[in-house]
Amino acid sequence: MAQKSILTEERAIPASQSGGSMRSMLIIGALFFIFGFVTWLNSVLIPYLRIACELNNFESYLVAFAFYISYLVMAIPSAWVLKKTGFKRGMSVGLGIMAVGALVFIPAAMSRTYVLFLIGLFIQGTGLAVLQTAVNPYVTILGPRESAAKRISIMGICNKVAGALAPLILGAIVLENADVLVNSLSSMSAAQQALELDALATKVITPYLIMAGILVLLAILVSFSTLPEVDTDHEDEAVASANTHKKSILQFPHVLLGAFTLFLYVGVEVMAGDTVISYGASQGIALSTSKFFTTYTLVAMLVGYVIGIVAIPKYISQAKALQLAALLGIAFVLVALFTDGYISVLFISLLGLANAVMWPAIWPLAIADLGRFTKIGSSLLIMGIAGGAILPLAYGGLADMLNPHQAYWVMVPCYLVIWYFATYGHKIRTA
């Protein structure tokens, strides 16, 4: 008979207290939708702010840096917040912080000040760090460990549907007639250029005002919802016995490797989604067309999530799925590197298919057997999201030094490390 895991222990929440697990999953699904929508707006903000604030490649990818570096800076404080508030109220706090970040876009747009845009993005990322530190272990804990990847995949569908919609909605607003504007700027006087760019900058005000209002409303709704509180500080006998001599999360090498793997995974996922619009433009494809490429990436991820839901764990284990996904990622990058034009751009978008099962598989493999260290372990993994800050910035620097095409070589070693974690790294334990 298999040992009972901590995750099965903690999922036994009476229906009378939880209002039903389905209701809880619907609430969590709505939250995944929200942070998917907010996150993938960056794919439009990068080319938009490059035009509005007159930036080069490296400077434009500071959008991703400011947003994702907040996960590194704020993940440990997020664990402290959750310890004080619990998971449920912590979600409301995270949503409120995100609303503040959205409001910062208003003075940023009115003054066309790039630093203010970056501050707003950092604040939004801070709110998401709190929200994700709470939500991700929640999904893992609300059911058996062996099917955690399936539940996270279902949440991922909510996330990526929102992500597919986000660039379409914001792109239609802020990148309308952007090609015409870019082509005509060089023939304008300095004063006329400033007026046109000021007008472009103000296009984000209404969308971000609406976003702030929705986030505040959701924070209130979650606070008064029937979402149950879960306790990760108590372990079953098997896990407690194994962890009696553990004093620090640093004594769990599979968690440390998992955090580094998440760092690389998020980096390549963000590169695939956030660089593809600009990459398409560098390949001579008009912005009016290339603005759809991030949506294609996220549609590919949706297909991957559906495959994961059907296949894991019935036909393939979480670890084996992660191995195959890493190898598929390497293959797609190499095709993109050795082709040009629409074919190359297509295979960057298709990386969404390879990336889809990575978060759902890495998370439960890395967080296994932590017991009372679950909250801090979750925070450490959330810190790995900072890969979305560092790796796209490295891509932007390489794109300026070489070109946007060859800069994608940075992805290959990332996928190799992901394959190593799936094959060997997640099994490493201390005696």
Image (cartoon, helix red, strand yellow):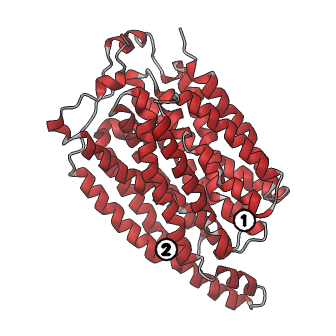
From the viewer's side, name the closer residue of 56 and 210.
210
- The kind of secondary structure element at disc 1 is helix
Q: What's the residue at 46%, 24% (across, down)?
A: 368
Three-letter amino acid code of the residue under disc 1:
Gly
Q: Is residue 288 above or below residue 162?
A: below
Whether residue 300 is visible to the viewer of this picture, yes or no, is yes
- The kind of secondary structure element at disc 2 is helix
Q: What's the residue at 53%, 69% (across, down)?
A: 168
Q: Residues within 10 Å of mark 2 (few under 14, many from 20)?
A: some
Residue 149 lies, in percent from the top left, at: 46, 35
Whether residue 111 is visible to the viewer of this picture, yes or no, is no
Q: What's the residue at 47%, 57% (across, down)?
A: 161
Q: Is residue 209 above or below residue 347?
A: below
Q: What's the residue at 46%, 59% (across, down)?
A: 162
Quick check: marks 1 and 2 in contact, CB under 8 Å? no
User: Which badge, 1 or 2, comes first in the chain's sequence?
Assistant: 2
- Please state which of the two labelled residues, at mark 1 or mark 2, is closer to the viewer: 1
Residue 139 lies, in percent from the top left, at: 37, 38
From the viewer's side, name the closer residue of 72 and 115.
72
Q: What residue is disc 1 on? A: 280
Three-letter amino acid code of the residue under disc 2:
Pro
Q: Is residue 129 above or below residue 106?
A: above
Q: Locate residue 30 relative to residue 395 in the image: left or right.
A: left
Q: What residue is disc 2 on? A: 107
Residue 14 lies, in percent from the top left, at: 18, 32
From the viewer's side, name the closer residue of 121 and 353.
353
Q: CA distance from mark 1 to mark 2?
A: 31 Å
Q: Locate residue 281 relative to residue 234 in the image: left or right.
A: right
